Amino acid sequence: MLIIKILGSGCANCKRLEQIARKVVDEMSIEAEVTKVTEYPDIMAYGITSTPGLVINEKVMSFGRIPTPAEVTTWVADALQTV
Amino acid sequence: MQINLTKLPLQKNTDLRSWALVALAAGIWVVLYNIIKPFADWLAYGLLALPHGSHLGESLAFFFYDVPKLLLLLSGMIFVISLFQTFIDTQKVRRLVEKRGEGIGNVMAAVFGAITPFCSCSSVPLFIGFVQAGIPLGVTLSFLITSPLMNEVAFVLLIGLFGWKIAGLYLLSGVTIGVLSGLILGRMKLERHVEGFVYDVKPRANIDLNLEEKLTWAERISRSWGSTKEIVSKVFLYVIIGIAIGAFIHGYVPQDALTGIMGESAWWSVPASVLIGIPLYSNAAGVIPIVSALLDKGASLGTVLAFMMSVVGLSLPEVIILRRVLKPQLIAVFVGVIAAAIILTGYLFNLVM
């Protein structure tokens, strides 16, 4: 199962990214857990310099921007292949 | 596990194709931009047959012209700004600022804060990164101050409604406020008022940053287009409401009605507008069109700019987020110094303009 983490303190951009991630998971009908990481010490542990960040199976895929649903779909598909 | 592969983006745009699309969009943009003025006049005075100079006619012509004009400006310029921003590498900037001390460091941090797209919530990790890198607190605060103060939507709206000169002044005074406030705050030995964990956070040793590969132009363009859509869809309703109120003021409020309360002679209007502006936040996109209409009715530029900066730069949600990394004393000093700097800027503009 995939673990998708949204890194962000809960601002509008982070919520938007969470929506996109959940939508992608729904559309691909895969088993994945989408969780939010909102505490700064935990966010900073991933070494990112700006939020929102997207982490799939402990790999940081993007930060500081909202990736498109198409990008997220590609990343999720890639992650599924490597599992 | 069953994967729905039909949704995958199989076809990738080439650079050439992307640039061709951009050129096409730019062409359409220019045509549209040039026909909205005659179209708005025709709509208000021709189709609706409102007499020239009537309150309703003036208001509606203003509204029909400003809404498409500002939305066009926003989408066009935000796209260009976003494209530029795809070249900014935050890691590199951190290394660059790290090498400088106070002074030059403050200027670089403030300029960086002005050109990055971050709202304060997304800049907190960068703040923590700056502190960890041993960058002086004052320099870091210069970044933290200009980052929300300078916002691309506000900048574009200023160009559309007030012209290049005032948009430039806004940029310049925002950076100056960031530099000066950072220098002052840096002298105040506030390090112990930063939350302790900021100094302790360590990235995990085995993190895997899948970044930032060399982007192709096609990727830059599609990312910029994505963020343009994101930003414009977030603010367009506020802009329209703001213009509607502005249009009403434009048509119905008599000339010079505000000279007494928002003009240069009313000395208290600058601090008052800053105090009112601080709690207003989410409507930054809506406030600027209203404020531009006030300027026509006798409000002075310094008062109007001070109001706008306090709306855009200081806000309750921002303070709540900053509270997670800064202790209350530092927050109070932070807000106090920025408010004072904005008030001074307001007086300065009232004095020289």
Image: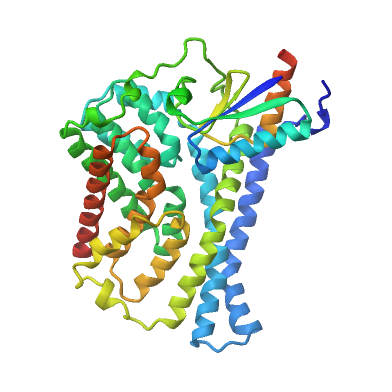
Residue at the image position 78 percent from the left and 31 percent from the top: A28
- Quarter holding the C terminus of chain A is top right
Tell me the quarter of the picture where residue B135 sits.
top left
Q: In this orientation, which residue lies closer to the viewer: A43 or B162?
A: A43
Give the color scheme: rainbow, by chain, secondary structure or one colour: rainbow
Residue at the image position 25 percent from the left and 78 percent from the top: B260
Residue found at the very far top of the displayed protein: B205
Q: Can I make out residue B28 in this image? A: yes
Tell me the quarter of the picture where residue A82 sits.
top right
Q: Is residue B46 left or right of residue B172?
A: right
- Quarter holding the N terminus of chain A is top right
Q: Can I make out residue B16 in this image? A: no
Tell me the quarter of the picture where residue B180 sits.
top left
B80 to A28, vertically: above or below: below
Residue at the image position 57 percent from the left and 72 percent from the top: B64
Q: Position of residue A29 (x, y in %)?
A: 79, 30
B45 to B327, vertically: above or below: below
Q: How many marks overall?
A: 0
Q: Is residue B209 left or right of residue A69?
A: left
Residue at the image position 20 percent from the left and 72 percent from the top: B266
Q: Position of residue B221 (x, y in %)?
A: 60, 38
Q: Position of residue B167 (x, y in %)?
A: 37, 55
Q: Position of residue B1 (x, y in %)?
A: 82, 20
B295 to B93, vertically: above or below: below
B220 to B297, vertically: above or below: above
Q: In this orientation, which residue lies closer to the viewer: B255 or B166?
A: B255
